[in-house]
Image (cartoon, rainbow, N blue to C red):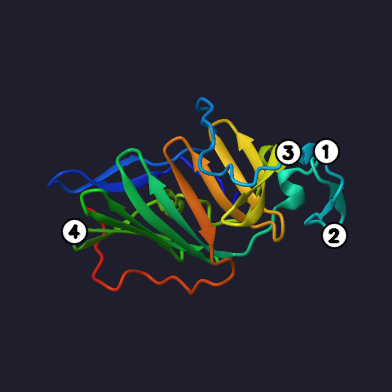
Amino acid sequence: MIGRIRRRRVVALIGAGGFLAVAGCLGDGDDPESADATDTTAGTDDSADDTTDEAAADDGGETTPDGEQTYADVHNYETSFTVEFDFDSPEPAVGTQTVHEGDYHVAIETDDGVTIEMYGVDGDLYQVAMGECIIEPGDPEQGEYVDANQELSDQMAEWTVTETTTIDGEEVYVFEDGSETHYLSTATGYPVRIEWEEGVGEFHSWGETDPITPPDMDCEEPP
């Protein structure tokens, strides 16, 4: 479910303490109240539903008139990409998730300068903070902010375009679901931006990331 923000566990460092698992971002069945998209109004085309241009779909090059496309019609992806995040909650932070063929690396820096890293590599989950590395048992997907796999849910596949707009000069389709707003490039079908109540994610480097390796340090399993 690429591009979908998920409510996943993220490791945060609280005060002078150690690792603490806290709630991450929106998604996976949550039903939050609706929130407006921000900073994406430049170049908005209010007549998108009336346009008659056609866009190529992912399934064999079939076309669908603009204004009637579903997410599945226009969505495209690669197994490698990068997302840059700017969070307001659970505390102000910025971060990056890099994905390469199912493996990922997440690095989050809090407002007070603390950096937390999560690695999902070859089925193992590593978390790094304060110069220490722990190998976490369980599902490595727990450290993700965006799904590294590419499978769309049936619900997400049926979202319909609400309008077109531009982001940094690039024309994008707009899809809205509750408090999440998703923007896909009209030229490539790749996700460009996702916004939710607590933050925003910017996608780039489709098909251009390097392989992800475990942290280059000694990592211990928790007691």
Which numbered marker is on residue 130?
4
SS label for mark 3: loop
Q: Is residue 159 visible?
A: no
For label 2, the residue is 61
Q: Quick one: label 3 or label 2, which is nearer the N terminus?
A: 2
Q: Which of marks 4 and 3 is in front?
A: 3
- For marks 3 and 1, give the CA distance: 14 Å
How would you rate the neighbour count of disc 4 (Cα within 10 Å): few for under 14, some for 14-19, many for 20 or more?
Answer: few
Q: Nearer the viewer, residue 160 or 16?
A: 160
Q: In this view, does 80 lie to the left or right of 121?
A: right
Q: Which residue lies furthest to the left in this view?
A: 16
SS label for mark 2: loop
- Pointers 4 and 3 in contact (CB under 8 A)? no
- Pointers 1 and 2 in contact (CB under 8 A)? no
Q: Position of residue 11 (x, y in %)?
A: 30, 48
- For marks 3 and 2, give the CA distance: 18 Å
For label 1, the residue is 50
Q: Quick one: label 4 or label 2, which is nearer the N terminus?
A: 2
How would you rate the neighbour count of disc 3 (Cα within 10 Å): few for under 14, some for 14-19, many for 20 or more?
Answer: many
Q: Which residue is drawn at 70% across and 53% down?
A: 75
- For marks 4 and 2, give the CA distance: 50 Å
Q: Quick one: label 1 or label 2, which is nearer the N terminus?
A: 1
